[in-house]
Image: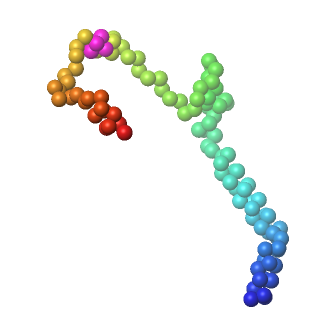
Amino acid sequence: MLIEKVKTAQVLKSKPTSSSFTAIFVLFALFIWGCSSSAPSVIWADEKPKHHTENGFRNYPVIPDPPSVGVAFYLRRTWGSFVLPDVPSDHYFSENKAIDVSN
């Protein structure tokens, strides 16, 4: 019993060796290199980063602008404000029932 405690204490007091520091350093260096490397063609275009434009900067990857809403959108919205939607006659909650359902 005493011998096991002494061995455990010796293991806990032992200092890391230089090989363990080397292994940690190599793993850390590989991690940093792996995170920082990517294909240059993905990041660069025309000798400058892709997020540089003639008008300033933009986020990358480029997200296209949404299409304009157009006249049809405004006509639908205007017509919808004058026409009531079809609502079933039993589509009604009392205030107490709505409170019960939401809790």
Residue at 78 percent across and 74 percent down: it is 12
**Is residue 72 visible from the viewing direction of this image?**
no
- Image quarter of the C terminus: top left
Query: For the point 78% across and 87% down, which residue is it?
Result: 2
Residue 52 lies, in percent from the top left, at: 64, 26
Residue 79 x/y as whole percent: 26, 12
Lateral position of residue 8 relative to residue 35, left or right: right
Residue farthest front in this picture: 96
Q: Where is residue 78 in the image (x, y as percent from the top left)?
A: 30, 10
Task: Name the one closer to the observer, 100 or 47.
Answer: 100
Q: Residue at x 22, y 14 (%)?
A: 83
Q: In the drawing, does residue 97 fall left or right of residue 35?
A: left
Q: Report the magenta residues as a range.
A: 77-81
Q: Which of 93 and 24 is in front in this view?
A: 93
Q: Which residue is drawn at 83% across and 71% down?
A: 15
Location of the N terminus by quadrant is bottom right
Q: Position of residue 13 (x, y in %)?
A: 82, 73
- Say if 99 sits above or below 86 in the image: below
The foreground one among 51 and 11 is 11
Question: How many marks can you see?
Answer: 0
Q: Is residue 71 above or below residue 21?
A: above
